[in-house]
Amino acid sequence: MSPLLDVRKLGVHYVTARGTRVTKAVDEVSFSLEAGETLGIVGESGSGKTTLALSLLRLLPTAARIVGGEVRFEGEDLVPKSERDMRHIRGKRIAMILQDPMASLNPLFTVGDQVAEPLRVHEGSSRKSAWARAKELLRSVRIPAPEARVKEYPHQMSGGMRQRIVGAIGISCEPRLLIADEPTTSLDLTIQAQYLNLLRELQRAHGLALIFITHNLGIVAKMCDRVAVMYAGRMVEAGPVKAMFDHPAHPYTRALLESIPRMSDARQRLTAIDGQPPDLARLPAGCAFQPRCPVAVDRCRTEAPPDIVVAPSHAARCWLASPGPVASAAAGRADVVGR
Amino acid sequence: MATPVMEAKNLSKLFPVKGGFLGRSAGVVRAVDDVSFTIAPGQTLGLVGESGCGKTTTAKLVLGLEEPTGGSILFEGKDLHSLDGTGRRHYRRSVQAVFQDPFASLNPRMRVGAIIAEPLVTNETLPGPEVKKRIAHLLELVGLPERAAELFPHEFSGGQRQRIAIARSLALAPRLVVLDEPVSALDVSIRAQILNLLRDLQAQLGLSYLFIAHDLAAVAHMSHTIAVMYLGKIAESGEASALSRAPKHPYTQALFSAALPSHPDERREEIILPGEVPSPLRPPSGCRFHPRCPHVMPRCSAEVPALKPQETRLVACHLFD
């Protein structure tokens, strides 16, 4: 069976008005996602993770161009589709939750109108039945007293409630894939825990596939089956979450995992990554991480590394990642982890 | 024990809320309500809690940017209220701050050298070459090259800007630095650099920190003591590693159980709290946490629990009476 989403060698470039400067925001990115699976896409600001998410829905800003590759969703390539066809997919087959719920809700319409809108647009429901369904949806995202809340406006809700309403809009047409771009960064810790559990329940109930765009490895550890790490527009490592936490194959992933403070080893010195993420318009030659890499060799400075498979469904773009003993040792483990 | 750098005694800050016809008083927000803590020399107090719990108001009180409506702040053992002009100036120089967003806290029209020197120029009369020498020394302390002084803030990345903000805060050789979410605006790979720098500076200069952050792991990593706030009150405070490993107050337990795991195998018992933090305008009666507490008892809604010693720390909960 083909996967639900299959992205192949996708490239998205930002081009200046005169076409003189090209920024490779997403560079030959490939990954796939099965129905009901959760993928975490991790990266720092400017690593291309949000551009990647927007290109899946073809919601890119005008300066951005998809320059190559395919986005196969349920077997169909979305890249050549017309704007009109895409409108039938957005919100219906693929939905998205953005970081700031106040910015994604319209302050001039009631919550009920906004939750009912996709139902009226995509399924042609009557106003009455859409509103009845909106109440059910609000109940399913744990909004207390939904009968009263449907008539209220976004400013009357707390941040956590607004984000749950955005979630209700997301699942209103029962999409197959939900893309969540930093969905909990604006929420408090205990509200974040509530929200993540809610997303997981919705995922189980509807068989949703989830893509989490995040900079937070904790969310990946808690929520995801698989993870893809982006650095400077490229996917530098992808694999099962547990394998990646136990045996990170790319030096960037390894450094990232080591640089995060942990509750258990308080007041020990952190292993910091030197330098800073590169400017995408002026990428270094060879591997983009090479100037900050503690183990870089001469080859890294001249040639960009290809994807090297280190274990089943676990690959890294690093010259030092070997499919040798590490892979064979990890292979047995990956079988247990992989599903 | 040495005199604490900073001691807050029963500190309160109420904000009147105006509303309705002719702006009549509609009540008060008890942003900080009867809060006490001490910060020892060379130590870090971590302050955690969710938005609206009073962390930032506490920081403003400590910085002298807000006047407390009740209680007192003692700096080096002296009550701020009893200080004369000279004492007050000394206090303002000795307590500095680093804020969350280094894109907002640095003036884009000033050169980095001038930004760092501003506290020196306004507080001391130093000859030009001496100022230059101090700028060079401060830049070296925070790991920036000397030529950075000639550049403007926009020429630096977020992490480097935060280093500039730290250099500025150190210009007057303070004793206490208030760090309000100092790394949350930075990229993940840069955070460790800044946290390490702050730790090194503390060891080198004997600084005390008041560290405010959302990220519990970062607070546990940086702090010697942690105070957990909920709706303007301290729910629990104590030695950092003991508190983060075995929290006692039901709110602290829920908060730390909601922290994200550092490994996919790390499974902790999650306590999912019902509802949300109530409005500080109408805080619940008795213990302010009681409507969300999984261990609520009848007396919780009637009596405000006092912050009492419990083994090595202080807990405000009727469960421990």
Image: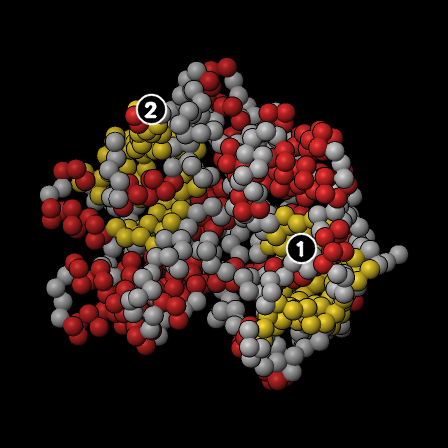
Chain on which label 1 sits: A
Q: Which mark is residue A73?
A: none
**Which quarter of the image is occupied by the C terminus of chain B?**
top left
> Alpha carbon of mark 1 to alpha carbon of mark 2: how far?
52 Å
Nearer mark to the viewer, of 1 and 2: 2
Q: Is residue B207 visible?
A: yes
Residue A338 at x, y percent in the picture: 79, 55
* Colour logic: secondary structure
Q: Residues within 10 Å of mark 1 (few under 14, many from 20)?
A: many
Residue at the right extreme of this rendering: A1
| Callout 2: SS | helix
Q: In the picture, residue B8 is in which quadrant? A: top left
Q: Is residue A186 left or right of residue B195?
A: right
Chain on which label 2 sits: B
Which residue is labeled 1 in the image?
Answer: A40
Residue occupying image coordinates x 29% and y 58%: B169
Q: Residues within 10 Å of mark 2 (few under 14, many from 20)?
A: few
Q: Which mark is residue B21?
A: 2
Residue occupying image coordinates x 58% and y 81%: A285
Q: Is residue B224 visible?
A: no
**Vertical placement of A210 versus A301: above or below?**
above
**Which quarter of the image is occupied by the N terminus of chain B?**
top left
Task: Inspect the image, locate mark 2, and give the three-letter code of the amino acid beneath it.
Answer: Phe
Task: Inspect the image, locate mark 1, and give the three-letter code of the amino acid beneath it.
Answer: Gly
Residue occupying image coordinates x 22% and y 39%: B74
Q: In the picture, residue B18 is in which quadrant? A: top left
Residue B297 at x, y percent in the picture: 52, 18
Residue occupying image coordinates x 61% and y 30%: A150
**Are labels 1 and 2 on one chain?**
no
Q: Is residue A200 left or right of residue A261?
A: right
